[in-house]
Image (spheres, rainbow, N blue to C red):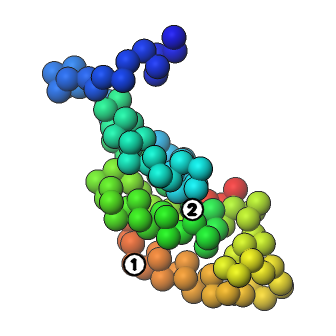
Amino acid sequence: APPWRRSEREPSARAMRGRQELFDAHCHLQDERVFSRAGAILSSAKARGVAKVAVNGCSPLDWARVEALYAEHPDQVVPNFGLHPWFLQQRGVGGGGSEDEDEGGWLARLEDLLRKYPVAGLGEAG
């Protein structure tokens, strides 16, 4: 079995001593397919030495889930807010995609989120 499936047991504090902490620089725990299990995923990651994870929002439609994960796990989640090129048509929260640069107020919302969460990064960017 692959190493990550060998055991669901958390290593003891003694086994963790001296181990390097890891940072997952790119994940999408806000994705609706895994969001309901994000707490368990974060616990499992922490038990395996992943101290922090960057959760990268892809469009205004998932930024609230990024906020929720950060609110629930501020010691482990680094929130990131951005627009992935695949989801540019969702930038106007109503699903619009006109030439108007700030249709739906997405740019103002993005700026507000970055001010509200000084630890946040700008991304997903593709």
Residue at 34% in and 65% down: 71
Q: Nearer the viewer, mark 2 or mark 1?
A: 2
Determine if residue 109 is in view.
yes
Seen in the image, is 82 located left or right of residue 18?
A: right
The residue positioned farthest toward the top in the image shown: 1
Q: Residue furthest right?
A: 99
Disc marking residue 116: 1
Res 94 → quadrant:
bottom right
Q: Which mark is residue 83?
A: none
- The location of residue 68, given as percent across then percent down, is 41, 65
Q: Which residue is mark 2?
A: 57
Compared with residue 24, is residue 66 higher up or lower down, i.e. above or below?
below
Q: x%, y% of residue 11?
A: 26, 23
* Label pair 2/1, CB-CB below 8 angstroms: no
The secondary element bearing badge 1 is classed as: helix
- Of residues 101 and 97, the one drawn nearer to the viewer in this rendering: 97
Q: Is residue 93 left or right of residue 108?
A: right
Residue 126 quadrant: bottom right
Name the residue: 50% across, 46% down: 25
Secondary element at image label 2: loop
Q: Is residue 123 above or below residue 48?
A: below
Q: Earlier in the sequence, mark 2 or mark 1?
A: 2
Label 1 Cα neighbours within 10 Å, binned few <14 / some 14-19 / many ≥20: few
Measured as percent of width and height from the top left, residue 107 is found at 62, 82
Q: Is residue 114 left or right of residue 76?
A: right
Amino acid identity at mark 1? Lys
Is residue 123 visible in the rendered structure shown here? no
